[in-house]
Amino acid sequence: MNRFMMAVVIAVMFMAGSAQAAGQKIYFAASAGLNNLMEIDDSGVTADFDPGYGFLFALGMDVGQFRVEGEIGYRSADIDELGIPGFTGPGNGDISVLSFMANGYYDFERSNSDWTPFVGAGLGIIDSDLEGNGPFFRVTGGNTNVAYQFMLGVGYAIDSNFALTAGYRFLGTFEFEENVLIHDLNVGIRYMF
């Protein structure tokens, strides 16, 4: 994980230097919202979740209709039900998911409009940690996996530097047995430097 963080820092420093040299705009984005983690099934042990919350922070570069960014996210949800082979019942505990993503966006810029729809995709790493208690058993575990995400939404320009955003994203892992799948609805801000 430390090597990945070092790579993110180097990429951001390179991106900032390249943007200044090319006259492109650097931006900071932050958003918060609700998420729905899909049921996790790991070798017969299942966990179902209540709706949760999440926070996302990104530093990126706007190059016209395209944007590239590095993003750090945190999501959490409480456990609703836990199951083991032959039994499923109420559970308590939670799951937390920390993500490190590299994203690319395409902005559908329209003349004479402050509204800008966008689509995007990302690739990175997530680290998940699950701790839960069933009626007579305890489940703990965590994993670090390669992840992908797809985003769509809209931005509203308050002025030339500041925009409000709203969007949906789907985040998943390439792990088939213990696949983490998350649906997010977020609202946020984006500030161009």
Image: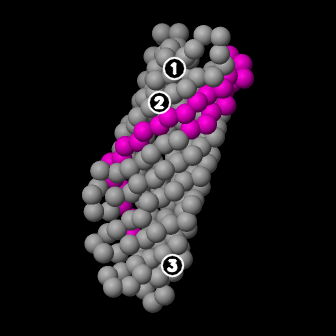
Residue 157 colored in magenta in the image: yes
- Indicate the amino acid at tag 2: Val
The outermost residue toward the right is: 158
Q: Nearer the viewer, mark 1 or mark 3?
A: 1
State yes or no: discs 2 and 1 in contact (Cβ < 8 Å): yes
State yes or no: discs 1 and 3 in contact (Cβ < 8 Å): no
Residue at mark 2 to residue at mark 1: CA–CA distance = 8 Å
Q: Secondary structure at mark 1?
A: loop
Among the two numbered marks 3 and 2 on one chain, the one whose residue lies closer to the N terminus: 3
Residue at mark 3 to residue at mark 2: CA–CA distance = 37 Å
Q: Is residue 26 left or right of residue 10?
A: right
The residue positioned 45% from the left and 16% from the top of the image is 18
- Per the image, the residue denoted by label 1 is 108
Q: Main secondary structure of the magenta part?
A: strand
In the rendered view, tell whether residue 73 sits above or below residue 104: below
Q: Secondary structure at mark 2?
A: strand
- Per the image, the residue denoted by label 3 is 91
Q: Is residue 19 shown to the viewer in this render?
A: no
- Per the image, the residue denoted by label 2 is 119
In the rendered view, tell whether residue 87 sits above or below residue 169: below
